[in-house]
Amino acid sequence: MASVLTFVLIGLMLTAPAVAADKVELSVDVSKAGAKIDRNIFGQFAEHLGHGVYEGVWVGPNSPIPNTRGIRTDVVAALKALRVPNVRWPGGCFADEYHWRKGIGPTGQRAATLNPNWGGVIEPNTFGIHELMDFLDQIGSEAYLSVNVGSGTPQEAAEWLEYMTTAQPTALAKERAANGHPAPYKVAYLGIGNESWDCGGNMTADYYLSQLKIYSRFVRNFNPAQQDKQQMLKIAVGPGGGEARWTEWTEVIMKAWQNRQWSWDMQGLSLHSYTVVRWPPAYASVGFGEAEYSEILKQTLTMEDLATKHSAIMDKYDPEKKIALVVDEWGAWYTPLPGSNPGFLVQQNSLRDAILAALNLNIFARHADRVRMANIAQMVNVLQAMIMTDKEKMVLTPTYHVFKMYLPFQDATFVPVAFDAGAYTRGNITLPRVDAIAAKDTAGKLWLAITNLDPNQPVEIETNLVGVTGKTAAGETLTAPKVDSVNTFEAPSMVAPKPISAEIQGGKLALKLEPKSVTVVSVD
Ligand code: AHR
């Protein structure tokens, strides 16, 4: 009798849907197109920190790990597929202690130095500016250099840029040629300092402002190809949060910029914001449940308030939105994985991080008129990484998959989406149940990215497509059995995108979204 009952129950579980899905109406009107979603919001950050550069990117030409001139080929292939628009380097806090000259010349003769910020380990300087530019060339990306304001000098930074960019036969250009690169390099973006209010020298806004003016004036890009259209964009240190001291920082820099004289300028103001809840980081990257899932997502959504708050201040002094808000450090920061060097910021990357990434990318897209660049921290093996490596092994993280699924949004035109999906509540945390963006790509095709934040309930979306003639929608959806599901070297596809498609009938697209999922579809 008991076994018959068990059989009937199992049969019921297999045939009946676990939970009835609610319908959510979503409207997209392509005639209301907004700003361009700058592809630079998909930028990466590679600091000399732990195994981010050494082992993660650089293994050296004599390594048994397949490489091209010392740069690992598996990582290059994975990043190339992401069409990474720019890479911020060499830090981070490291940048304000980095002296570029130590990283040029024959590798065997480069002086070893220290990396006091990150574990106090030896910095071999084998990965210097020539290796960075080779790496960027291999993945097809642009350089975003952070120059040393904290412990360097304007002269040191100015010489670095002359070394890299002049086409004239100066002593520095000849040295560059002797080191293997006669042609000037392109430096697309220049960060003037990093977190100068903290690890970059604990400066006041006024003190930093005077440094900014000097560096902006003297650190010149001489590349003949960058004097007109492709001019190097200079990015000033901006706020690190939303509290009064940060709004004041934004005020000071932006007000000064509005009243600037001809001799200095900037084109971007940085914003750093990690999803951490509290310092020091207290949340684990593995082995967590729904409570931690919802707490972390609640905090990540505060990026919306930060973007709104700082954009409003910038609007006062720059109504034409000439200055970009550059979110050049963002992502989740958890406790270090047990057994790892705490200075190396090693953490796992779960389905929760994929959802977190999608939510932030959606916020940047909604602020596309002002947020025109962003850099997730960090590219390989550090914090919310795209890729994790262990000697010859490599695994793509759930966050990597979101960046790949969002490729069509690079340089696409934002299209507003209207919906009311209600809320998902867990304990005292309430989150929107659904988040969505839409955009038209450069070929005019409509793309939708929809995240179902609810970890338990599927969502049925009915999209009303105004001004769209397509008949089908197809794309990918990313979910996994649990909110803390991760990819490992042994099980690399636990969190991997799967195809999804649907018919469009009567101008309406019906999609059923799995709980805790990110879905990207195009309308054809
Ligand atoms: O990304 C790690 C560190 O976080 C960076 O070096 C610093 O800028 C920030 O505080």
Image (tube, rainbow, N blue to C red):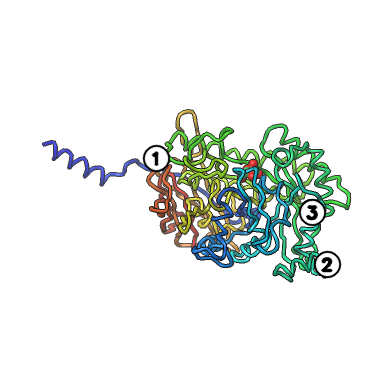
Looking at marks 3 and 1 on the same chain, the residue that comes earlier in the sequence is marked by 3
Residue occupying the point 44% across, 53% down: 477
Determine the quadrant in which ligand 1 lies.
top right
Q: On the rendered structure, is 339 left or right of 102?
A: left
Question: Comparing marks 3 and 1, which lies closer to the viewer?
Answer: 3
Mark 3 residue type:
Glu
Question: Could you tell me if the residues under marks 3 and 1 are in contact, i.e. CB atoms within 8 Å?
Answer: no
Numbered marks: total: 3
Residue closer to the observer: 173 or 78: 173
Residue linked to disc 2: 170
The answer to whether the residue bearing label 3 lies less than 8 angstroms from the nearest atom of ligand 1 is: no
Which numbered marker is on residue 456? 1
194 above or below 446?
A: above
Category of crowding for the residue at label 1, using alpha-carbon neighbours closer than 10 angstroms: few (below 14), some (14–19), many (at least 20): some
Residue closer to the observer: 286 or 257: 286
Element assignment for label 2: loop
Q: On the rendered structure, is 292 left or right of 97?
A: left
Which numbered marker is on residue 156? 3
Category of crowding for the residue at label 3, using alpha-carbon neighbours closer than 10 angstroms: few (below 14), some (14–19), many (at least 20): some
Element assignment for label 1: loop
Quadrant where the N terminus is found in the figure? top left
Question: Could you tell me if the residues under marks 1 and 2 are in contact, i.e. CB atoms within 8 Å?
Answer: no
